[in-house]
Image (tube, rainbow, N blue to C red):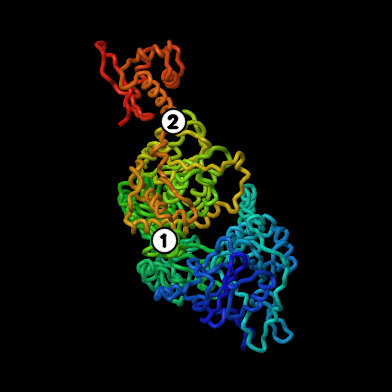
Amino acid sequence: MTLTRNIGKICRITSTNPITLGKTFQIGLEGVKRTTAANLVAGTVDVLPFNSVSDFVGILQDVGNNQALCASLPLSGDKPTPLVTKSELALNRNSGAITRSKEYFAFPRGQRGVMTLDYDPPSNASPFHREELWALLCKVVPQVEQAGVIWWCSGSSYIYSGNDAIQGIKGQRLYIFVNDISDIERCGDALAKRLWLAGYGHISVSKSGAKLIRSTFDTAMYEPARLDFIGGAVCHPPLEQRRGSPIILSDGGWLDTVAAIPDLSAVEEKRYEGLVSNAKALAEAASNAAREEWLRERLADMATKLAALHIPEDQISDRAERCLRSALGGVLHGDFEIVLDDDTVVSVGGILDNREKYHGRLTKDPLEPDYQNGKIVGKLYLYGAAPNLHSFARGGSTYKLRRQPKRLYVVKGRRPELVDSIILHLSREDDIFVRGGQLVQVVNGGIRPFKKTSLSHTVGSRIALYSKNAKGIDCPVDLGSEASEMILALAEYGEFREIKAFVTMPFVRADGSLVLAPGYDEKTHTYADFQQESIAPLPEAPSSSDIVQALKTLWGPWSKFPFASEHDRAAMLAAIFTAVCRPSLDTAPAFFFDAPVQGTGKSLCAAALGALVRGKRGGVSPFVGGDYADAEMLKQIVSMLLTGSSFWLIDNVVGTWKSAVLSALITDGAVDARILGQNTWVRGEARLLLCATGNNASLDKDLGRRFVKVRIDSGEESPQGRDFDFSPVSRALKDRLQIARSVLLVIRAFSLAGNPALGRGTAGFGAWSSLVRQCVMWCSSKGLTHEAGIGICGDPAISILEDAGADDEDVIALTSLLRGLALLYPNGQTFQAKDVLNIWFKGLPDAAGGMVHVTDGLTFFLHNKKNVSAMTIAKVFRYRRERPAGGLKLVEAGTDRNKTNYWSVVSVS
C-alpha cells in the first residue's frame, strides 16, 4: 500500500526474540510472580497508516503482547524491515536490517502521526482518573479538544484471578493526533514546562539522591525510537487480563502543536526555572538522606574489594569513600565497578585500559544496577578526549570515566617538585589544555579558564594530596594558593596540548578530510564534543541523489528567507558550510546579513546560523558605536577567546561601520591582548564564525573586504507581517547534526570530483575559498542546488570581489574627487594643489561636471573647512596617492623647482 503524508503513520515492531515484550504474570509458591520481558534482540518493523480515530483504535486493539508501537518512523521507508541489534548489524551491514536507534528512526517533517503521553503517577500521590487526566490536559492545552485523542490503560493493567483483582490500573496513555510529528520533541519539552507552570510539576528523588525534574507525563516518550509497550501482558491461568477497549476522548482532527503548545516566553521560562529551583531546594533533605543511605550500603563491599587488591589498610576506608562520593557527583574513578549487559563486572580502570574492547558496550545503570529489574540503560563512549558512560535511567545522566586519583605527598620545602608532578599529571588528563597561554578545561559543553579556586577543586578530584602528621599517619590536605598560582603561571611551558577550537558537531579539515569522531583532533587542535552514534554513516562515494538530499537537509532552516539574488543565496549556503568548516580554518570571512527595511528576518536568519554552530540559542551582542567601541570590542574578544566561543553575532549595525579591531581579527584570525583587570596577556587563535546584521548599513572598505554580504529582500513595505510555518532557530537546533553530516557529505563529493577550481581569485581567504566557496559554486554548476530547491547560486564572495568599499564614504568621496580631476585634467594632464585650491574657492566653467565632483570630494575630506590652503589639499592628495577608486588613482608626476608636487589621474591597469 502506498502511504502519503496526508494520512497518519505509526510504527509497529514485532519481536521474534524474545517471543514476548509484555510483562508476564503467573502464580507461584510465594504468590503472584511478575517478570519483565528481556530486551528486544530481533524482530520486524512495519508502518501502519490511519486516517481516523476509529482507525487508530483498531491498531491499538490489534497490538499483541509480542509487539510494541513507536511514534517515530524508520528512515528505511514504509516497507517491512528486519530489526536487529547493533552488534548483529555490524556483522552484516548489507543485510538491509536496521537497529532501534536514532540512527535509523526519526520524526519526518510534515508527517502526520500520534504524540503519545505516558502517565505513571508518583508513588507518593493519588493517581488521576481518566476524566481528571483529560481535564488537566485540556486546561493546559485547550486546543487539544479539537484533536483526535484516545485513552487506554498500560499493558500491565487490570490483572485478575477470577473475581479478585491482582493488579489494577498502572499507567495510562493518551494518543493525540498531531499534524507534524517532527515537532514532537520540541512540543513535548514545552508541554512538560507548561505543566509545571500550571502546578503539575514535582521533584522525584532517586535511590542515589538525584533530584529528577518530573511533570505529569514521561518526557522519554517524545524521543525517536522509543517503544510503547501497549500490547498487553502474558497471563498464565488462572490469571487473565481485562483491560477493556481503548476509549475515544475526542473524535477530532490533527493538532497544530506549534500553535497549541508554543515555547515558553522569556518571562515564562524564568518563572519555570524558579519553580524548579524552589522544588529542588525543598527536596534537598530527602536527596541528602538518599545519598548517604546509598553510600552506607556500598562502603563495606567496596572496602572488601580494595583489600583484595592489596591496597594498604590505612588507605582503604578513605579511598572507598572518595570513589563512591565521586560517583554520586557524576565521576566514576578507576576502582568503581560497572555491570555490563552480559552481567560481567569490570572496573573503570580496566575499561580505560581496553578502550577498543569496551567502546560501545551496553551496561546497567552505574549507580543503581537493579534499576527497573536490571534493565540495560547505559552505553560506554570511550573514544575521544572525555570517556564517559551515558545512562538513560532517571531522565538520562552522563558519567565521566577517570583513572584512580594519583596519591602525592606535600612535603615542606619541596613545593616546586610537587608543582612539577601535578603539572605532569594534569597534562595527561583528557580534558585539560592550554588556550591563549592560559590553562583551560573542557567542561559542560564548553571551555572554562582555570582560576585558583577551580584549579584547586580539579586537582583535589584528580590527585589525592596527603601529608604525614607527627605520628606518620597520612592526612588529606588541600592544594595551597601559592602552588595553584605556580601551576597557572607555568602552564603554557608544560606539556599541555593546545586547543584552538571547540565544536559540538563533526567538522571538515582545511584539506577536505572529515573529522567524524569526537575528541581531540591533533591535526587541527580542535576538541569535538558530540555523540558519534547520533550521526548516520556517510556513503564512501555520494551519488547525485545523495548530494541533492543533503543540500535539502542543510538548507531547511533557511529555506523560507527571500534572498535578494543568486549571489546572496550562494553567500548563505557558504555561511552554512563555513559554520561546519570554521574550526579547521586559520582565517575565514565574516558574514553581514543586510536588508532594506526592518522586519525582513535578517537577525532571525543569522540567529539560526548561531544555533547551528553553538547547539543553543544566543551568542548575540548589540551593536555599539562611538569612539570607544573598538576598546570594548577587544575586551569581549579576549573573553570569547578564553572560553572558546565559536559564534558571535553583532546585531543591528547602523551608519558606516569601521573597526580596526575586527579587521585585524578577521584577517589574522588571532588575538594578542591583555585580560581585563589583570596584568596577563593572552595570545591565541579565535576560530569563531563572526556575523553582523544591519538595515542598509555601510561597511568601510576594510570591513567590506572581510565581510561576505547576504542580502534579504522580501519586496514588501512591512515584511514583519510575514509568518514562518516553522521556527528557523528551532529547526537548526533540532537538525544541526544532520546539517553537519550533510555538509560533510557534499564536501566529500566535491573532493572526489577533484576539488575543481571555480571563480576568480581567492577573495583574500585562500583555504576558505578552496574548501567552501568553490564547493558552493561547484554544486550550482552541476545543477544540484537547483534540483534541491535552493535555486541557482552565484559566487558567494562577489561582495568582497566587486563591492568591497562600495558603501565606504571615504571610497565614495575619493571616487568623486578622482573622476572630477580626470574630467578637468584629462589624458594624464598634470596639476598642483594650488590649481585645485582655485577650484575650491573660485570655481571654473565646466560643462562636463568635473568641478562639482571635485568640490563634493574635497568637502568630505576637508569637512567644509574655511581655512583651506594649498598645503591642506596637498595633504589630502598625499594620504590618498596610489589608492584605486572607481577605476582611477592619483599619482605623483614630478615636482617644480620649489619641490612642489605635480599630480595626475590615471586609469588603474
Question: Which one is in front, 412 or 517?
Answer: 517
Is residue 374 something one can see in this rendering?
no
CB under 8 Å between discs 1 and 2 = no
Q: Is residue 259 above or below residue 361?
A: above
Question: Which one is in front, 315 or 611?
Answer: 611
Give x and y (percent) for residue 257.
Answer: 64, 58
Is residue 17 something one can see in this rendering?
yes
Q: From the image, tell me which residue sits under label 2.
A: 808
Quadrant hosting residue 183: bottom right
Quadrant of image for the C terminus: top left
Give x and y (percent) for residue 643.
Answer: 44, 47
Give x and y (percent) for residue 402.
Answer: 40, 62
Give x and y (percent) for residue 196.
Answer: 66, 57
Quadrant of image for the N terminus: bottom right
Q: Residue at x 40, y 55 (%)?
A: 782
Real-space CA distance between mark 1 and mark 2, rounded to the nearest whole angstrom: 42 Å
Which residue of the protein is positioned furthest toward the left in this rendering?
Answer: 897
Q: Amino acid at mark 1?
A: Ser
Q: From the image, tell me which residue sits under label 1.
A: 544
Q: Is residue 122 above or below residue 274?
A: below
Quadrant hosting residue 175: bottom right
Of marks 1 and 2, the one in the foreground: 1
Q: Secondary structure at mark 2?
A: loop
Label 2 crowd bin: few (<14), some (14–19), many (20+), radius 10 Å: many
Dot placed on the residue nearer the N-terminal end, 1 or 2: 1
164 with respect to 711 (left or right): right
Q: Secondary structure at mark 1?
A: helix
Q: Is residue 435 above or below residue 473?
A: above
